[in-house]
């Protein structure tokens, strides 16, 4: 199992309509991407972020399906420009010591297939974690 987490801090000045649409898009990912077994979107308290979204995936094949699904792409296009700070991370019970490298490879492939996504991510004021740009820019 993979628990793919996203921590989000929104920019100042986001309209209520933009905020509501961003939340709706996160929920859409959980409901419509077949690889997502369960998901959770909720407010963060006591941390440096505003919102968290977790998507539970069976394996790396499901992770890849999640990354390239149109609902995920739509979420990236809409939400990244609204973020001040973004952190992604992955938790797994897979004992493979190369698991982190495999996640990094899927993220790298995702960026290689989508130059617009690279531009959006590079424009973020702060981006850390498993989906952070490494050898593709920044």
Image (cartoon, helix red, strand yellow):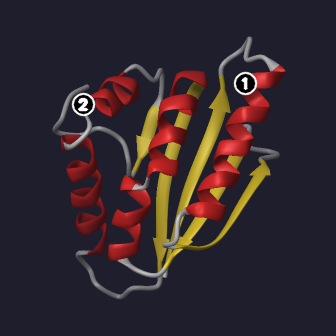
Name the residue furthest top.
Answer: 13
Q: Quadrant of residue 7?
A: top right
Quarter of the figure with the C terminus: top left
Give me the residue at 68% from left, 36% from top. 22
Q: As drawn, is 20 to the left or to the right of 10?
A: right
Give me the residue at 39% from left, 30% from top. 121
Give me the residue at 20% from left, 52% from top. 109
Q: In the rendered image of this protein, does residue 111 appear above or below residue 53?
A: above
Residue that mark 2 sits on: 115
Q: Is residue 111 visible?
A: yes
Residue that mark 1 sits on: 18
Label 2 – label 1 distance at C-alpha: 24 Å
Give me the residue at 33% from left, 75% from top. 61
The label number, if any, that marks residue 107 in the structure image: none
Give the secondary structure at mark 1.
helix
Q: Is residue 48 visible?
A: no
């Amino acid at each position: 199992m993979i628990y793919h987490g996203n921590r989000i801090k929104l920019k100042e000045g986001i309209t209520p309509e933009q905020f509501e649409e961003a939340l709706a898009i996160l929920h859409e990912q959980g409901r419509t991407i077949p690889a997502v077994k369960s998901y959770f979107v909720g407010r963060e308290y006591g941390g440096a972020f505003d919102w968290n979204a977790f998507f539970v995936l069976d394996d790396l094949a499901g992770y890849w399906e999640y990354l390239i699904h149109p609902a995920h792409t739509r979420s990236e296009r809409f939400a990244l420009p609204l973020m001040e700070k973004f952190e992604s991370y992955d938790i797994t019970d897979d004992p493979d010591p190369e698991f982190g490298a495999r996640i990094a490879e899927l993220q790298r492939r995702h960026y290689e297939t989508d130059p617009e996504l690279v531009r959006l991510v590079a424009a973020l004021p702060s981006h850390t974690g498993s989906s952070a740009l490494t050898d593709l820019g920044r």
